[in-house]
Image (cartoon, helix red, strand yellow):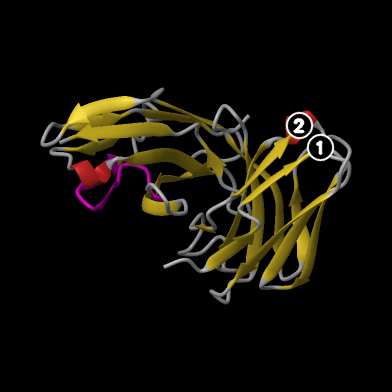
């Protein structure tokens, strides 16, 4: 079935270090699903961080980047230099079928950034 | 700025009781959702409504029933709760042009945490 697998947390890094959170997907309904990263900051609701709908393209937001790799079915989230304010839970997600009103989420990765 | 409002934020109850969660969105969206986040933090879709019409109904026990009075409201009723219903229930909304530029862009509330004793 359609699913998303991402790095098990928690992940702890120090401020200014680089970060990568792995995400791989499986989509049976459609060859190239739309891919997303959502984020939940402490005390806030889950919100969209970035999305990529075309294989091979890269999305970016708030210093984070993710590239849609159809060969490895991956959509890893990266940041060159994290800040303490990046501490949050990050969810990789996909839309398996543009005719179906649903988004499939991974389990989330809790990121702690130490000052 | 929050635009999807859920009440209550927390609810503790006993097995067999009935519970209702309310959700309202002020974004003018056509589609609303309920997701369940269990103890393992997995987010699973339960229901989707588009213009008050049920369009996604995942494998959910019959004791769960969504209720939509208009496009801006989607409530969730749980009749006779079970211990496995303990979870965080997240309401979300999205533009109605699914398949267009806004595909997959959901706006979430802060969640309603249910504890069943």
Q: Secondary structure at mark 1?
A: loop
Q: Position of residue B65 (x, y in %)?
A: 83, 52
Residue B94 visible to an observer of this rendering: no
**Res B14 label:** 1
Callout 2 secondary element: loop
User: What residue do we see at 69% from left, 73% from top?
Assistant: B71
Q: CA distance from mark 2 to mark 1?
A: 5 Å
Q: Work out whether disc 2 and disc 1 sit on a shared chain.
A: yes
Q: Which residue is pictured at 61% across the width and 38% down the height?
A: A29
Is B111 contained in the magenta span?
no
Residue B4 in the image: above or below residue B12: below
The answer for which chain carries disc 2 is B
Looking at the image, do the residues carrying marks 2 and 1 touch, with CB atoms under 8 Å apart?
yes
| B70 and B11: which is toward the camera | B11
Quadrant position of residue B83:
top right
Density class for disc 1 (Cα within 10 Å; few <14, some 14-19, many ≥20) is some
Q: Position of residue A82 (x, y in %)?
A: 17, 39
Q: Is residue A60 magenta?
A: yes
Mark 2 Cα-neighbour bin, 10 Å: few <14, some 14–19, many ≥20: few
Q: Quadrant of residue B63?
A: top right
Nearest to the observer: residue B107 or residue B111: B111
The correct choice, above or below, for B90 with respect to B85 in the image is below
Please report whichever mark, 2 or 1, sits nearer to the chain's N-terminal start. 1
A29 with respect to B69 (left or right): left
Residue B31's tag is none
Magenta-highlighted residues = A52-66
Q: Which residue is mark 2?
A: B117
The image shows residue A108 at horizontal and vertical percentages of 45, 34
Q: Could one spot residue A5 in this view of the protein?
A: yes
Q: Quick check: A108 left or right of A102?
A: left
């Amino acid at each position: 079935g359609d699913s998303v697998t991402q790095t098990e947390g928690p992940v702890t890094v120090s401020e200014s270090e680089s970060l990568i959170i792995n995400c791989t997907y499986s989509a049976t309904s459609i060859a190239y699903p739309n891919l997303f990263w959502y984020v939940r900051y402490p005390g806030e609701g889950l919100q969209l961080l970035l999305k990529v709908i075309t294989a091979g393209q890269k999305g970016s937001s708030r210093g984070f980047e993710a590239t849609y790799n159809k060969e490895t079915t991956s959509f890893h989230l990266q940041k060159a230099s994290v800040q303490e304010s990046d501490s949050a839970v990050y969810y990789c997600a996909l839309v398996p079928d543009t005719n179906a009103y649903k988004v499939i989420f991974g389990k989330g990765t809790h990121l702690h950034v130490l000052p | 700025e929050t635009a999807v409002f859920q009440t209550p934020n927390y609810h503790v109850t006993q097995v067999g009781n009935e519970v209702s969660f309310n959700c309202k969105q002020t974004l003018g969206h056509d589609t609303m959702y309920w997701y369940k986040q269990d103890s393992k933090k997995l987010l699973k879709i339960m229901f989707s409504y588009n213009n008050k019409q049920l369009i996604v109904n995942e494998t959910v026990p019959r004791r769960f029933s969504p209720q939509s009075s208009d496009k801006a409201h989607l409530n969730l009723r749980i009749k006779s709760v079970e211990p496995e219903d303990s979870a965080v229930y997240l309401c979300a909304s999205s533009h109605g042009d699914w398949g267009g530029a806004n595909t997959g862009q959901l706006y979430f509330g802060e969640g309603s945490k249910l504890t069943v004793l």
